[in-house]
Image: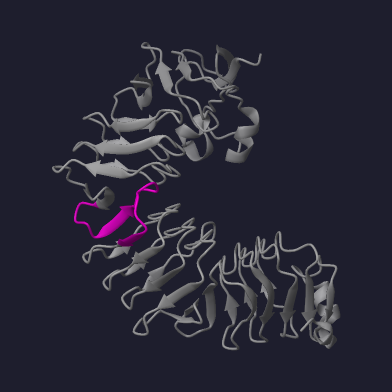
Amino acid sequence: MRNLAVVWVRSLNVRMKTPIFIIIPLLTILLVIGMPIFEPDMLDSYLECNGKTSVTIPLTVTTIGGWDDYPVEAFLPCTNLTSINVNKRNLAFSSIDGVLFDKSKQTLLAYPRGKQGAYNIPNGVSTIEMGAFSNCLGLTSVTVPNSVTTIKRFAFYDCTSLTSITIAMDNAHYSSEDGVLFDKNKTTLILYPAGKQGISYTLPNNVTEIGNEAFESCTNLTSITIPNGVTKIGTSAFSGCTSLTSITIPGSVTSINNGIIFGIFDNCTNLTSINVNEDNTEYCSIDGVLFSKTKNTLIRYPSGKQGTYTIPNSVTEIGVNAFLGCTNLTSVTIPNRVTSIRNKSFKYCRNLRSITIQNPTPPNVESSVFDEISPNACFYVPAGSITAYRDANGWKEFNCIKAIASAPE
């Protein structure tokens, strides 16, 4: 059974409430039909592609689905796959040169992860499905025809060798400049290719929005210049920019989406300074740390900053993902005005050993706030509040809660 695949399908000509199983040679791959059955991380444990390079979808398969109806997920574990073929009699799917499409060939569903080099999307395609090219590490360039009207989110996620995206001049919905993807009017920067060479980039002056994941995993960039005029920065916009050391937010920015699941500067491991133009009316920075303009909310502490940190006394809320992944942080002092610590604020701060909380009333903590901090971490609280912290939700699971007087200097 090592070289066989179990495919979960519903037949074209059989009505049934439960799936049937079909054995397909050469590739172990799960095509989940109907509602998603497994979360994405669970799919990997069921799929073993065994180094195979091609798979053929039989005529009986009517739906390929994964998490959130994300068809390419079924193929994500198949790193050597260069060809997805479809039985010509299949009424739902088709393939061209080993790339998976819907039957009409108007929607590009999945590009094989092992396919190498440049790719020209066929004329007539109107939609690039969510994640269609995701994790295609050998993809170097993509040419998009004028027929494409929709490029869905994560379409080119983690394509680390992708150096350029070229849009047909007469495309009515998208444009490109020097291999970078924009909307037609070039007011929204949609995607800077992760494999693009060069260590610095200055956004064109007419850009007003930096899209979700726009610079994600652009590990070559050490400097990104954002012009005054940009008003919105999307979630995960700079996530994974591991060479970026500092960035300046201009005065025009009014919206920074530091999302609950993905933060704007997550995994920027060398980022030591987030600066904000003093004319900005929504945000400010103190010593390279990003705050709301009122200084009541700490939004993001740079992942590359070292040592200890004392949060300013003005802060009442520590924001979502505020210190996420700050592995160089060893000690933090939280002032007595802080009443709320949001989701994943200190998650993955693996060297954080000393947390001093000055508020005698335990602040409200949301989910996963201190997940995967140092196993030797200790919380130091006002002497008269030790019992309150040991009884409070979100705090009582910690074994080491001591009086502030015993905190290390």
The magenta segment? 183-201
Answer above or below: position of 140 versus 102.
Answer: below
Quadrant that contains the C terminus: bottom right
Q: Residue at x 44, y 70 (%)?
A: 246
The x, y position of residue 258, in whole percent, is: 48, 65
Q: Position of residue 4 (x, y in %)?
A: 60, 15
In the image, is residue 180 above or below residue 58? below
On screen, residue 5 versus residue 350, left or right, reads left
Q: Quadrant of residue 238?
A: bottom left
Q: In this view, which residue lies farthest toward the left?
A: 170
Question: Which corner quadrant of the image does residue 128 belong to?
Answer: top left
The reply, left or right, for residue 348 in relation to residue 148 is right
Task: Name the residue: 34% across, 54% down.
Answer: 198
| Quadrant assignment for the N terminus | top right
Colour mapping used in the image: one colour
Q: Disc count in the image?
A: 0
Tell whether position 64 is magenta: no
> Is residue 60 shown left or right of residue 224?
right
Residue at horizontal 30%, vertical 32%? Answer: 119
**Image coords of residue 48 (percent x, y):** 61, 25
Secondary structure, magenta segment, majority class: loop
Is 352 located above or below residue 189 in the figure?
below
- Asked if the stretch drawn in magenta spans residue 197, the answer is yes
* Residue at figure coordinates x 50%, y 26% from the top left: 80
* Near-viewer residue (353 or 371): 353
